Amino acid sequence: MFSTTFLGHQSWLLSSQRTCILIDPLLVESVGHADEVYRVWPPREMDLPAFPRVDAVLLTHEHEDHFSLPSLHQINREIPVFLSARSSTAARTILNEMGFHTLLVDAGQTLSVGDLECVFFSPDHLHTNNGDEWDVLQILVRDKGRDGSFFSAVDCHVTERTWRALREEVDRLDVLTYANNQTDWSFLRLGTFLEHSRPPLDSMNFVANLASELVKRSE
C-alpha cells in the first residue's frame, strides 16, 4: 500500500508496504536565521519516535526550507542521505561532518529504495525564470507494485519535456505537489496530462476546470 504524509511546508513522508522515504524533512517549527525566521504553518506536533523506520532521506536542494540542519540533526546517521549532484561542496561537507553517508543523484537517474522507485527530473533554467533554484531536482516516487505515485515540482516550473517524460513513467499521478513559490495558474493545464485518466487525476481536472471557470467570471 502506497501512502503519503504531508509534514508541513514541502516536507513529505512516503511509504509503501516495506519502505519509507523522507523528502526534504522539516521536523522543527521554524525556518531561516537572523532577521528572516519563518514559522511553519499550520502548526503541527511531531512525534518522531512514532515515525515508521526510514530507509532513505532525499534532499531536493540546499535551500534551508528543504535542507534543514536542525531537522537533519534529529535523524539517525545510519540512514543514507541522497543529495542533488548540483549542490555545493559546502552542503556535502556539512552532511559528511554530521556523520551521514551521502550519495549524489542527478536528473535522468532512477533510484531504487526497497519497493519504491525515485525518478529525478531537471527544471529548465535556460528558458524559464526559476530564480535561484539552480540545484533543484524535481522528483517522481512510485511504488514498484503500481500501488501509487507522487510527483513534486519542488520550487520550479514543470516543462513540457518533463510532462512528456512523466507520461512515459506512469499511467496516472496520484499526488501532484506545487511548492508555494510556484503557485500560479499553470496547473490549469493538468487536463492535458492524460486524455483518459482514472481518479484521482480526474479530481485534479475537476479542480482545474473549476478554477478556470472562476477566472472567466472574474474577467
Image: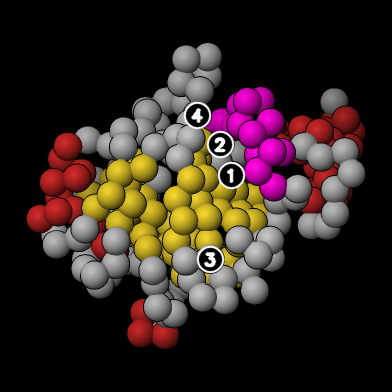
- Along the polypeptide, which appears first: circle 4 or circle 1? 4
Residue that numbered label 2 is attached to: 182
Q: Is mark 4 on a helix, strand or loop?
A: loop
Q: Nearer the viewer, residue 137 or 131?
A: 137
**Res. 32 in view:** no
Asked if the residue at tag 2 contacts the one at tag 1, i.e. Cβ–Cβ closer than 8 Å, the answer is yes
Give, as a single range, the part of the protein colored magenta: 156-170
Asked if the residue at tag 2 contacts the one at tag 4, i.e. Cβ–Cβ closer than 8 Å, the answer is no
Mark 1 or 3, closer to the camera: 3
Is residue 29 shown above or below 135?
below
Tag of residue 115:
3
Residue that numbered label 4 is attached to: 123
Label 1, label 3: how many angstroms apart (C-alpha)?
25 Å
Label 4, label 1: how many angstroms apart (C-alpha)?
13 Å
Mark 4 or 1, closer to the camera: 4
Q: What element carries label 3?
A: loop
Label 1, label 2: how many angstroms apart (C-alpha)?
6 Å
- Along the polypeptide, which appears first: circle 3 or circle 2? 3
Residue 161 is covered by the magenta coloring: yes
Mark 4 or 2, closer to the camera: 4
